[in-house]
Image (tube, rainbow, N blue to C red):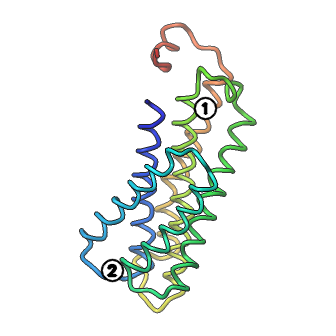
Amino acid sequence: MNTTIYYFLIYIAEALICIQYTSNIFSDRFSHFKTFIAIFILYSTLFIISLLQNPYINVIVFFIFHIFIFCCLFQTTKLNAVFHSLILTITMIFTELIVLTIYSNISVHFYTEIYIHHITLVMAIISKLLYFIITFFISHTLLKNSNNTIPFSSRECFLLCIIPILSLWISFTFIHMCLTTPLKNKLDAMIRSEE
């Protein structure tokens, strides 16, 4: 049950990242509120489909849903929608694979069933932070190259991304400390929840 809640929160985070990405790239066809609600409904559908636990279906549906989101909710061409959907899909796949590869190599408990909820939560937070950072840079780079005015300079965009980058570094540091340093019983009980 905890894993299902984690995945639901992951899809909420992905919806917010999609909203951030599209707000920098496209012009809305409808009000921001209607666009916001439509994206959350579509991401809820993505979450329900993900319960099938088939990664191939998840990737295909993720790609198709983003084309649908871009074509229906924003003023863009179909080719442009496919391009941006491909960007988000590839970025999502790479960020999850990067985190999975790094975490599986540094975690002693990665393959233990006991720690599955902790591992899922930590990997989700780190991969979504990385996904956000990359899509943020992409959306602001594409916005800078278009005729629109960019709300931030390149230096300001970098400074805005320092917080998620530092969060990633702190997360990796805590993970490494928790996995390699033996803790006293009271401190261990505070960090680990009893199931």
Quarter residue 108 falls in = top right
Q: Name the disc covering residue 192, or none.
A: none
Q: Amino acid at mark 1?
A: Ile
Query: Which residue is at the front of the view, 89 or 142?
Result: 89
Q: Is residue 194 left or right of residue 103?
A: left
Badges 1 and 2: C-beta atoms under 8 Å apart?
A: no
Position of the N terminus by quadrant:
top left
Nearer mark to the viewer, of 1 and 2: 2
Front-most of 164 and 53? 53
For this rendering, which residue is in front, 70 or 169?
70
Q: Which residue is mark 2?
A: 28
Looking at the picture, how far across and down is residue 160, in whole percent? 46, 62
Classify residue 109 by image quadrant: top right
Residue 175 is marked as 1
- Name the residue at 59% across, 71% down: 87
Q: Going 38% across and 78% down the picture, which residue do you hit?
A: 72
Relative side of 177 to 61, left or right: right
Q: Residue at x 61, y 63 (%)?
A: 91
Up-down relation of residue 118 to residue 169 (above or below) = above
Considering the numbered disc 2 on the image, is that residue within a helix, a strand or a loop?
A: loop
Whole-percent x and y of residue 146?
50, 89
Count of marks overlaid on the render: 2
Query: Callout 2: 10 Å neighbours few (<14), some, many (20+)?
Result: some
Q: Secondary structure at mark 1?
A: helix
Q: How many C-alpha atoms fall within 10 Å of the one at disc 1: few (<14), some, or many (≥20)?
A: some
Residue 73 position in % (x across, y down): 36, 77
Amino acid type, mark 2: Asp
The disc, 1 or 2, on the residue closer to the chain's N-terminal end is 2
x%, y% of residue 152?
Answer: 43, 75
